[in-house]
Structures are given as structure tokens and as C-alpha cells.
Amino acid sequence: MSEENIEYRIVLIGNTAVGKTSLFKKISTKVFLEKNISTIGMDKKTLQFELDIDGAKKGFSISLVDTAGQERYRSITKSYYKESDGILLLYDVTNRDSFKNVNIWLESIQEVIGSQKDSKYLIILIGNKIDLIGVDGKERAVTEEEAKNMCTEKNLVWGGECSVKDIDYSELEEKFKNYVKLIYGKVI
């Protein structure tokens, strides 16, 4: 490990059942669990790894926080925004309401830490559950173009669409490390 150890807090937010806990567990255990119990309050894991940044090895210690999506826990979730360096905001591509509620989550963030334009933190928008779309595409409720447009309008980073269930762990880990690099570029 490198001599320098950079510590970040990354918070997972979004409606209930968009896949926050599945993402949290897969990135921290390398396994997708079919059955997840709703998160009560929050859960936290520390991930450690090295990244090559501009030709130099840097050690990272990431405190990853999985938060509850239920409205009754939003005040608890808000308490984790203040100390965050990055926020992964998930929605379900087959659930229109989860995408509409991205605006509510953004308002909640702004109440606590203000506008992203003036801040050191990043909000990365991720569409999950593409495995549920089906071959005919009828189950898709949110297009990728809509999500990208929202990112442009709201000054978010587009994190892409995925299926936490189907994505290979090494690919998920690579995406996560790229998110950390984006946060590093914003924070320094």
C-alpha cells in the first residue's frame, strides 16, 4: 500500500428497492444476495484499495454508507450528507417514481450541504435493474437519454446504467474505482 492514505465517505441514496443494499453488499463482499432486508437507518463498510493516479500509487480508504430509502428514515440519511465526499444516487430504470424522486433526494441534499456547483462533493446518478427490462423493452420506465438530460440540468455525473445482479464483480469494482477517481479529481 502507498504511504499516503486518502479517506473518503461515499453515501448510497435513493428510493426503497432501487438496489442500494445490493450494490453495497456486492462491492463489499463480491457476492450478489438475492434476498435483502430493507436497511434500517444505515450500514457501513470500509473498503481499501490502491489506485494509479497520474502515474502515482495512492491508497484509498472508502467509508461506504448504505442508507435507508424509506421516507421515515430521511432525517437519519441527511445526517450522512454533511461529511460525504461523494453520493451515489440510484434509481430503478423500471420504476418511474424512483426516477421522479431523484429531485426530492437532490432537494434533501441541498438542504444540508447546498448547491453541488459550489461544493467539493460529487453526486453520481446510476440507473439500476436493467436486467428487468426484458428483450422487448416494455418494462423500461426511464430512458438513458432522460437520465443523461437530468444530469446535465442538475449538474450531476452520469454513472451509467447497470444490473447490480448481473454485473461481474471485477467490472463493478472498476466502475466504483472510477467513481473514486472522479471524487479525487473534484476534492483535490
Image: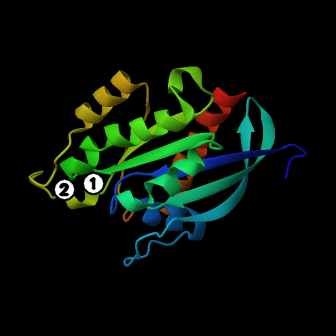
At 46% across and 69% down in the image, what residue appears? Answer: 39
Q: Do labels 2 and 1 touch, CB within 8 Å?
A: yes
Of all residues shown, which one is farthest toward the right? 3
Q: Position of residue 88 (x, y in %)?
A: 48, 46
At 26% across and 60% down in the image, what residue appears? Answer: 131
- Asked whether residue 128 appears in the rendered view, the answer is yes
What is the three-letter code of the residue carrying label 2? Ile
SS at circle 1: helix
Q: Position of residue 130 (x, y in %)?
A: 27, 54
| Quadrant, the C terminus | top right
In this picture, residue 86 sits left or right of residue 48? left
Q: Dot 1: few (<14), some (14–19), or many (≥20) neighbours within 10 Å? A: some
At 40% across and 36% down in the image, what residue appears? Answer: 107
- Asked whether residue 159 appears in the rendered view, the answer is no
Count numbered badges in the picture: 2
SS at circle 2: loop
In this picture, residue 121 sits left or right of residue 71? right
Q: Nearer the viewer, residue 116 or 124?
A: 116
Q: What is the number of the mark on residue 139?
A: none
- Residue that numbered label 1 is attached to: 130
* Residue at mark 2 to residue at mark 1: CA–CA distance: 5 Å
At 15% across and 58% down in the image, what residue appears? Answer: 134
Q: Nearer the viewer, residue 15 or 28?
A: 15
What is the three-letter code of the residue carrying label 1? Ile
In this picture, residue 102 sits left or right of residue 178? left
Q: Position of residue 176 (x, y in %)?
A: 55, 49
> Looking at the rendering, which quadrant does residue 42 occupy?
bottom right
- Residue that numbered label 2 is attached to: 133
In this picture, residue 50 sits left or right of residue 19? right
Q: Is residue 56 above or below residue 130?
A: above
Q: Position of residue 121 (x, y in %)?
A: 59, 33
> Looking at the rendering, which quadrant does residue 82 occupy?
top right
